[in-house]
Image (tube, helix red, strand yellow):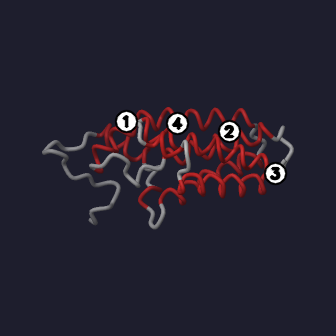
């Protein structure tokens, strides 16, 4: 089995990964989307925006997207420590629950700012593009927040990027 296979964890410091840690890492990696290469954050953002777009087509409202994003954010905050232990670095690229939560929050905020008056496809495209720009470039204040201790640093920089993406998307679409 290859080393990167998500179901196989080598022991960390001689302690085998518990079932709880394996579940936490699975969730932190966005149900294994974080193992996709190249650009796991982009893959996760695309999946999150696609799910959000589908939800909007089916009638999801801004509050529903915001609540979903906040729940994913809180879940990410809980599962990130296990992923940091598993991958042995402060901000593992495999951890993409932060991108998933942030995209849903950005969709919900943009929809709120626009009063629900926009084409869902255009909204999804704009949010995806602006969020990825801010998440990759990391302008102020995203870069400052990223330096906070974990799990806050892992999760909060994407939250700030989501707010910036929502503001820019709203301005461009409004």
Which secondary structure lies at badge 2? Answer: helix
Identify residue for label 2. Answer: 65
Q: Earlier in the sequence, mark 2 or mark 4?
A: 2
Q: Is residue 136 left or right of residue 153?
A: right
Place of residue 74 in the rendered image (x, y in percent of width and height, measured from the top left): 50, 32
Looking at this rendering, what residue extends furthest in the front direction?
140
Circles 3 and 1 in contact, beta carbons < 8 Å: no
State how far apart marks 1 and 4 are (Cα).
16 Å
Q: Position of residue 136 (x, y in %)?
A: 53, 56
Residue where numbered disc 1 is placed? 149
In the image, 155 versus 66, the foreground residue is: 155
* Image spot of residue 103 (x, y percent): 61, 47
Residue behind mark 4: 73
Q: CA distance from mark 4 to mark 3?
A: 26 Å
Query: What's the residue at 47%, 35% (across, down)?
Result: 75
Q: Nearer the viewer, residue 126 or 61?
A: 126
> Label for residue 173?
3
Does the residue at mark 4 contact the one at mark 3 (Cβ under 8 Å)? no
**Marks 2/3: CA distance?**
18 Å
**Could you tell me residue 115's position as x and y percent?**
84, 37
**Circle 1: element type:** loop
Where residue 141 sits, quadrant-wise, is top right
> Left or right of 14: which side holds 60?
right
Dot 1 and dot 4 residues touching (CB under 8 Å): no
Q: Nearer the viewer, mark 2 or mark 1?
A: 1
The single residue placed furthest to the left in the displayed view is 14
Question: Marks 4 and 2: in contact by CB < 8 Å?
Answer: no
Element carrying mark 3: helix
């Amino acid at each position: 089995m290859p080393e990167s296979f998500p179901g196989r964890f080598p022991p960390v410091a001689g302690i085998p990964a518990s079932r709880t840690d394996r579940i936490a890492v699975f969730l932190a990696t966005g149900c294994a989307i974080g193992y996709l290469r190249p650009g796991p954050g982009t893959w996760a953002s695309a999946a999150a925006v696609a799910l959000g777009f589908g939800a909007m087509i089916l009638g999801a409202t801004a509050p529903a997207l915001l609540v979903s994003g906040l729940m994913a954010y809180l879940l990410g905050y809980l599962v990130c420590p296990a992923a940091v232990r598993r991958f042995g670095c402060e901000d593992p690229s495999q951890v993409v629950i932060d991108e998933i939560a942030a995209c849903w929050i950005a969709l919900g905020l943009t929809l709120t700012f626009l009063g629900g008056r926009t084409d869902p496809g255009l909204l999804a495209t704009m949010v995806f593009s602006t969020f990825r720009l801010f998440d990759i470039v990391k302008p102020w204040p995203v870069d400052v927040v990223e330096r906070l201790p974990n799990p806050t640093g892992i999760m909060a920089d994407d939250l700030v990027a989501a707010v910036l993406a929502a503001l820019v998307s709203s301005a461009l679409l409004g």
